Image (cartoon, helix red, strand yellow):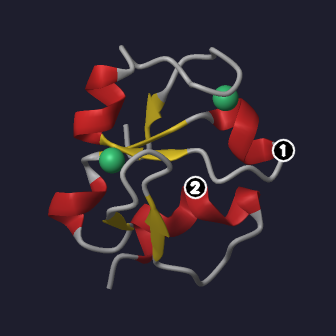
Amino acid sequence: MTIGLLKGVNKSGHKGWTTEKCAICGTTLDFVSGYEAKNIYYCPRCVSQGLKAYFCSADARVLHYKCPYCKGELKPYYA
Ligand SMILES: [Zn+2]
Ligand SMILES: [Zn+2]
């Protein structure tokens, strides 16, 4: 089980979900698989406001780790 990894998820109110779509390319981001989860980036500000501001690592790099919505800094989901 990866309960420990999911601790950070609870604060967003999405307890129990395991995947999201990259906001740019629509690829499925798997929050459970340890390998894939390391490649997930998100914008804490937008996510806290209910936006699905999740990005795959490739798009995060293209965006220079800046959120396309609020221009905030993208964070790795599991830092
Ligand atoms: Zn993407
Ligand atoms: Zn943002």
Pinpoint residue 39: horizontal percent, then vertical percent. 25, 47
With 7 as the anchor, is 65 left or right in this view? Answer: left
* In the foreground, 44 or 3: 44
Pinpoint residue 21: horizontal percent, then vertical percent. 46, 63
Which residue is located at x 49 percent, y 26 percent? Answer: 74
Q: Which residue type does callout 1 highlight?
A: Gln
Against 5, residue 42 (above or below) is above
Which numbered circle lies on residue 49?
Answer: 1
Q: Which residue type does callout 2 highlight?
A: Gly
Q: Considering only order in the chain, which callout, 1 or 2, is on the residue closer to the N terminus?
A: 2
Pinpoint residue 72: horizontal percent, then vertical percent. 63, 16
Which residue is located at x 35 percent, y 64 percent? Answer: 29
With 26 as the anchor, is 66 left or right in this view? Answer: right
Pinpoint residue 2: horizontal percent, then vertical percent. 35, 76
Determine the image quadrant of residue 68: top right
Q: How crowded is mark 1: few (under 14 residues within 10 Å), some or many (20 or more)?
A: few
* In the foreground, 14 or 28: 28
* In the foreground, 4 or 14: 14
- Are the residues tagged 2 and 1 within 8 Å (C-beta)? no
With 11 as the anchor, is 49 left or right in this view? Answer: right
Which residue is located at x 35 percent, y 30 percent? Answer: 60
Which numbered circle lies on residue 8?
Answer: 2
Q: How crowded is mark 2: few (under 14 residues within 10 Å), some or many (20 or more)?
A: few
Which residue is located at x 50 percent, y 49 percent? Answer: 23
Against 76, residue 63 (above or below) is above
Against 70, residue 52 (above or below) is below
Depth-wise, is mark 2 or mark 1 nearer the camera? 1
Q: Please, what secondary structure does the residue beneath circle 2 have? A: helix
